[in-house]
């Protein structure tokens, strides 16, 4: 078993102290962390999206900052601004909340495009530029964004260029009855989701260990057959009659890196086709643009990924 596979168990134990169920979502968060990506959490209010982000940051001993996105939020409210210091007789840059390790962009689609665009450089290059000066954010920087899939009034849909920068889009579903009952029992027993320390959520990995885990993921081998499988999947989305826009090369990279991370948390140092197949939905669902006819036929995000995927033979 790899050290990263052991980390998976510890990460689940830490986040699971406050979040009941949602095992696939927690795995998705861990995979995103291991490849240094960003994640979009989509679910109705009250499904613990914010709590999962806080717990994940606490589990990896990361600084955490939450920004509530609203229509009046300005780019400078995120990046920071330059102010005049009369006592020094000079201008000084005051860092915004983006200078952190884990940035929770809560209800990201409630801010207009100009404010959303403040994240583009940060998400791709891990730096921000203000007044012509580029300032690094560090290799642990990660955006966790949330949005509500059923409420559209007063929202601004994310452009494709920004959606493509998210490594995964994870659907956070409402719990089934047994899971919800278990959650209520924990709350009744005294669990306070606002106090993570009291809930027993402590770091299971520090910065050095995370760097080592990422190196272990990077060292996972990928055969020519698996690379061919990835390119065939991406090509199938680009020729799908349901789609006006298929997966980008960044989407292919996400399948490659995600497949390596999936293999690593399962204790293997090589990728198998099922590793890639298992992450196709979260890695591609937000990168594909459906044709209007397909939407009228009831083809949703899941179908848009699964239909072209089903046409690609799995290498043996």
Image (cartoon, grey):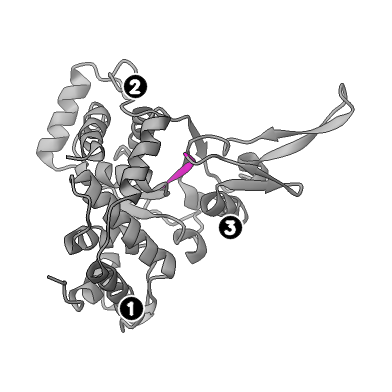
Q: Which label lies toward us, 1 or 2?
A: 1
Q: Is residue 196 magenta?
A: no
Q: Is residue 309 left or right of residue 85?
A: left
Mark 2–mark 3 Cα distance, whole angstroms, equals 33 Å
Q: Which mark is residue 196?
A: 2
- Name which residue lies at 50% across and 54% down: 154
Q: Is residue 142 magenta?
A: yes
Along the line of sight, the residue nearer the viewer: 191 or 31: 31
Q: Is residue 42 above or below residue 178?
A: below
Query: Is disc 2 surrounded by few (<14), some (14 to 19) or many (20+) residues within 10 Å?
Result: some
Residue receiving disc 1:
235
Which of the marked residues, 1 or 3, is nearer the chain's N terminus? 3
For residue 50, say whether it is visible.
Answer: no
Instruction: Please state the total of marks drawn on the protein image.
Output: 3
Specify the quadrant that holds the C terminus: bottom left
Specify the quadrant that holds the N terminus: top left
Q: Position of residue 30 (x, y in %)?
A: 31, 42
The secondary structure type at the circle numbered 3 is helix
- Name which residue lies at 50% across and 59% down: 162
Classify residue 182 by image quadrant: top left
Q: Is residue 124 left or right of residue 49?
A: right
Q: Which mark is residue 299?
A: none
The secondary structure type at the circle numbered 1 is helix
Residue receiving disc 3:
113
Q: Which residues are magenta?
A: 140-145
Q: Is residue 281 above or below residue 184?
A: below
Along the line of sight, the residue nearer the viewer: 98 or 278: 278
Q: Position of residue 284 (x, y in %)?
A: 33, 64
Q: Position of residue 237 (x, y in %)?
A: 32, 76
């Amino acid at each position: 078993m790899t050290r990263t596979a052991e980390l998976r168990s510890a990460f689940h134990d830490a986040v699971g102290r406050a979040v009941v169920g949602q095992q696939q979502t927690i795995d998705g968060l861990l995979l995103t962390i291991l490849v240094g990506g960003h994640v979009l959490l989509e679910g109705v209010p009250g499904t613990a999206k914010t709590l999962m982000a806080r717990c994940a940051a606490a589990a990896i001993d990361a600084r955490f900052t939450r920004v509530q996105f609203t229509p009046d939020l300005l780019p400078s409210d995120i990046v920071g601004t330059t102010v005049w210091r009369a006592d020094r007789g000079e201008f000084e840059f005051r860092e915004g909340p983006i200078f952190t390790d884990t940035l929770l962009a809560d209800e990201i689609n409630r801010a207009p495009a100009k404010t959303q665009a403040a994240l583009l450089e940060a998400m791709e290059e891990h730096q921000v530029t203000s007044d012509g000066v580029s300032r690094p954010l560090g290799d642990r920087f990660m955006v966790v964004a949330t949005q509500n899939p059923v409420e559209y009034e007063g929202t601004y849909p994310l452009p494709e260029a920004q959606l493509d920068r998210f490594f995964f889009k994870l659907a956070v579903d409402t719990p089934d009855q047994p899971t919800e009952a278990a959650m209520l029992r924990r709350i009744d027993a005294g669990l306070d989701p606002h106090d993570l320390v009291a809930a027993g959520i402590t770091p299971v990995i520090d910065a050095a260990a995370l760097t080592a885990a990422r190196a272990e993921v990077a060292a996972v081998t990928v055969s020519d057959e698996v690379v061919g499988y990835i390119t065939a999947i991406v090509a199938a989305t680009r020729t799908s009659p349901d789609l006006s826009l298929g997966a980008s090369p960044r989407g292919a990279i996400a399948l490659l890196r995600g497949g390596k991370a999936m293999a690593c948390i399962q204790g293997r140092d090589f990728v198998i086709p099922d590793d890639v197949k298992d992450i196709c939905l979260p890695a591609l669902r937000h990168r594909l643009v459906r044709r209007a006819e397909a939407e009228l036929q009831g083809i949703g995000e899941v179908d848009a990924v699964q239909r072209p995927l089903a046409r690609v033979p799995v290498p043996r």
